[in-house]
Image (spheres, rainbow, N blue to C red):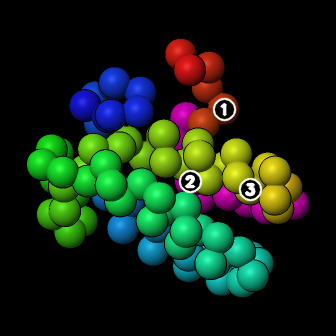
Amino acid sequence: MCVLCDEAITNPICLDCLGKSMEQWAEAIKPTIVKGLAEKAWLFKSYTHEGTKCVVCGNNINICAHCFCKEVYEWLQEEHSETTESFLVCFNYEIRSPCKF
């Protein structure tokens, strides 16, 4: 279960693997935001404890891809709004869907 939304983790990709993909995306779109993305991922490191395993690397996961991508998307909206559409093309984990929070 995700510790932020209390829903089942249905896309088991850890923050490290997802963050690396986001950094690669940022390098291609707007390299100046890479540092900000890395800082966002680091903020969530304290949530990593025994839980679901990442299908890519085997790390533990306690935050779902939806919650992490939603946080990054909101940061991009505030700081780099010109990148949000491109971000959603690559990392839309139901971010535009209505959610309970």
The circle drawn on residue 76 is 3
**Type of amino acid under label 1:** Arg
Does residue 40 appear to the left or right of 8 in the view shown?
right
User: Picture quarter containing residue 33?
Assistant: bottom right
Vertical position of residue 25 compared to residue 13: above or below: below
* Structural crowding at the residue carrying mark 2, measured as other residues with C-alpha within 10 Å and reported as few (<14), some (14–19) or many (≥20): many
On whether residue 49 falls in the magenta region, the answer is no
**Type of amino acid under label 2:** Phe
User: Picture quarter containing residue 36?
Assistant: bottom right
Q: At 49% from the left edge and 48% from the top edge, which residue is drawn?
A: 68
Q: Secondary structure at mark 2?
A: helix
Q: Magenta: predominant secondary structure element? A: helix
The circle drawn on residue 91 is 2
In the image shown, does 77 or 96 lie closer to the viewer?
Answer: 77
Which of the two discs, 1 and 3, labels the residue nearer the N terminus?
3
Q: Secondary structure at mark 1?
A: loop
Q: At 81% from the left edge and 51% from the top edge, which residue is drawn?
A: 78
User: Picture quarter containing residue 29?
Assistant: bottom right
Q: At 34% from the left edge and 24% from the top edge, which residue is drawn?
A: 6
* Structural crowding at the residue carrying mark 3, measured as other residues with C-alpha within 10 Å and reported as few (<14), some (14–19) or many (≥20): some
| Magenta region | 82-94
Q: CA distance from mark 3 to mark 2?
A: 12 Å
Q: Mark 3 or 2, which is nearer the eye?
A: 3
The circle drawn on residue 96 is 1
How many numbered marks appear? 3
Which of the two discs, 3 and 2, labels the residue nearer the N terminus?
3
Q: CA distance from mark 1 to mark 2?
A: 11 Å
**Type of amino acid under label 3:** Leu
